[in-house]
Amino acid sequence: MRAHLVLKNDGGIEFQAKGDSGHQITVGFPEDAGGKDSGPTPMELLLYGAAGCTGIDIVKILEKMKAEVLEFEILIDGQRAEKHPRRFEIIEIEYIIKGKGLSEKNVRRAIELSQEKYCSATNSLNAEIRYSYQYENI
């Protein structure tokens, strides 16, 4: 996997990033860091990636369990260290799932499998991952 970032220094620091998928995104920085606040920050992108990775795992695992996910929200909160490199020390993820054929057992198991076995993004981070969930069987 490869990505290419190009600095756009036209009145504020930002990068244009493009990966193997061919999709392009602007990586932004807040104004107090010399940026133009023109896109998600690198740390926000880490959270988006972690949430998206675990989210797709959970949907696919629940589908294999014959459940149908109708609505799914992920709330993710990263707590950063006070001192540099200001990494995420704790990441809390809350899953809110509504669907058909859901049970406490299969929702919990899908989340555990994602966190312990399948999600490359969360398993690449040097942070304690905590999670909680709510589900509603419709």
Image: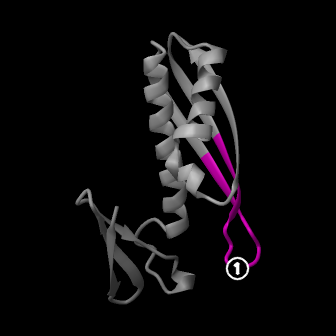
Q: At x 26% / y 56%, what residue is drawn?
A: 21
Q: Is residue 4 left or right of residue 46?
A: left
Residue named by callout 1: 84
Front residue of 110/55: it is 110
Give the magenta part as a residue range.
76-93
In which quadrant will I find the N terminus? bottom left
Direction front: furthest residue: 117
Residue 133 in the image, given as x and y percentages of width and height:
66, 30
Q: At x 65% / y 16%, what residue is drawn?
A: 105
Examine the rendered structure and indicate whether residue 42 appears above or below residue 129: below
Mark 1: few/some/many CA within 10 Å (<14, 14-19, 20+): few
Does the stretch in magenta take in 84?
yes
Does the stretch in magenta take in 114?
no
Residue 64 in the image, given as x and y percentages of width and height:
44, 19
Front residue of 85/113: it is 113
Examine the rendered structure and indicate whether residue 87 appears above or below residue 100: below
